[in-house]
Image (cartoon, rainbow, N blue to C red):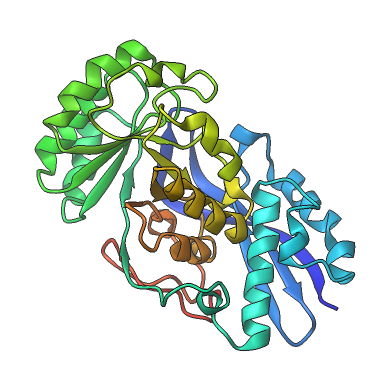
Amino acid sequence: MPELSACIETFALRNHFTISRGSKTETVVVTATVSDGDVSGRGECGPNARYGETPESVHAAILDRAPDIAAGLDRHALASRMPAGAARNAIDCALWDYEAKRSGEPVWRIAGLTPPQPLDTAFTLSVDTPDAMARAAAENAHRPVLKLKLTGDNDLARVRAVRDAAPGPDLIVDANEAWDVAAYEACVPAFLDLGVRLVEQPFPAGRDDALASLERPIPVCADESFHDAASLEGLVGRYDVVNIKLDKTGGLTEALAAAKAARAAGFDVMVGCMVGTSLAMAPAFLVAQGARFVDLDGPLLLSQDREPPLRADGSRLSAPERALWG
C-alpha cells in the first residue's frame, strides 16, 4: 500500500503581496506525497491563518492520516475522515495524482471531464497607494483582467487610478471583508463606469446580511463566505458568484462537486487560489474549465516556480504537463 509523507516549502514572491489583512514577501506551502516506491502523486496546499491554519498544523494534520492511507483510505472516503481545509486538499490532490500516474490515465479522464483547454487568468495587483497601483496597472495593461486588492479606505481613488493607467482590461475588485455598507454604496455605482465586472467579498463573512437588501448592479462574489457545497444555501439572495478554492473545499473531489452544485443553484462560478505554485494550480485548472471568472495567477506572482511549471503566455495558462500533476 502507498505511504503518505509531507513537507513544508517556502517560495519567494516577485514583489510584496498585500491585502487588507496583511503583507508578505514569500509564500509557505505544504506538499503531500503519496508513494508506493514506484509511483508518486503530489498535492500542494496553502495554509491560511484566516481559517486558523499554520504550516505546522497542516503538516501535522496530513501526517495524522498516514496510517489511514497505508491501510487503504482512498479519495472517495477521505472526506469522512477529516474536515475540509488545506490539509485535506493536499492529500486529496496527491491521491488523484497518484491514481493518474498509477493507471496511466489523466485526471480529467478519470473524473469524467472533457480535455482541458487554455484559460485566461486574472492578474492580481496588491493593495498600495493609488499612484503605486497605477504604475503596476500600466506594467500589466496588456492583460485581459486585473484583480485589485482593496482596503475600504480610498478605494475609489485606487480604481480610478488603475483605470486611467490601464484602459483596456476588465477589473475585479476584492475587499477581503474590509468594507462596510457605506463603502459599498460609495464605490459600487462609480465602479460601473470604470469597467469593474465583479466585486469580491465586500463584507465580513457572517456579517453579510446587508447584501440581501442592497442593489447589486455588479455581480458580488462570495469568497470567505463560501467554503464548499454546504455553504450554498446560506448565500442565496446575497451573492451572485462563488469563489471555489481547493484549499477551502478540501480538494479537487469536493471542488468539482461544489462547482456543479453552485451552477445548479443559480450561481456563477469563479475559481481562485491562494498564493501557491503551479502544483496547486494544476487541479484547480480542471475546475476552472467553463468558469465565468478565473483567478489562478499564483505562479505568476512567484520569483521561482516548480519544474515543470504551468505554462503561461502572458495571462493565458496552458493545461499542466503530467510530469507536474495529473
Image quadrant occupied by the C terminus: bottom right
Residue located at (58% from left, 77% from top) = 110
Q: Does residue 59 appear left or right of residue 300 in this picture?
A: right
Q: Position of residue 306 (x, y in %)?
A: 51, 69
Q: Does residue 253 appear left or right of residue 26 in this picture?
A: right
Residue located at (62% from left, 74% from top) = 97
Q: Does residue 300 appear left or right of residue 141 in this picture?
A: right
Vertical order, 171 against 201 (above or below): below
Q: Position of residue 293 (x, y in %)?
A: 33, 50
Q: Position of residue 11 (x, y in %)?
A: 54, 56
Q: Position of residue 5 (x, y in %)?
A: 78, 66
Of 22 and 173, nearer the camera is 173
- The answer to whether one can see residue 31 in this image is no
Of 96 and 22, nearer the camera is 96
- The answer to whether one can see residue 277 in this image is yes
Q: Which residue is outermost to the top?
A: 182
Question: Which quadrant holds residue 159?
Answer: top left
Residue located at (55% from left, 75% from top) = 107
- How many marks can you see? 0
Image quadrant occupied by the N terminus: bottom right
Residue located at (21% from left, 55% from top) = 143
Vertical order, 28 against 151 (above or below): below
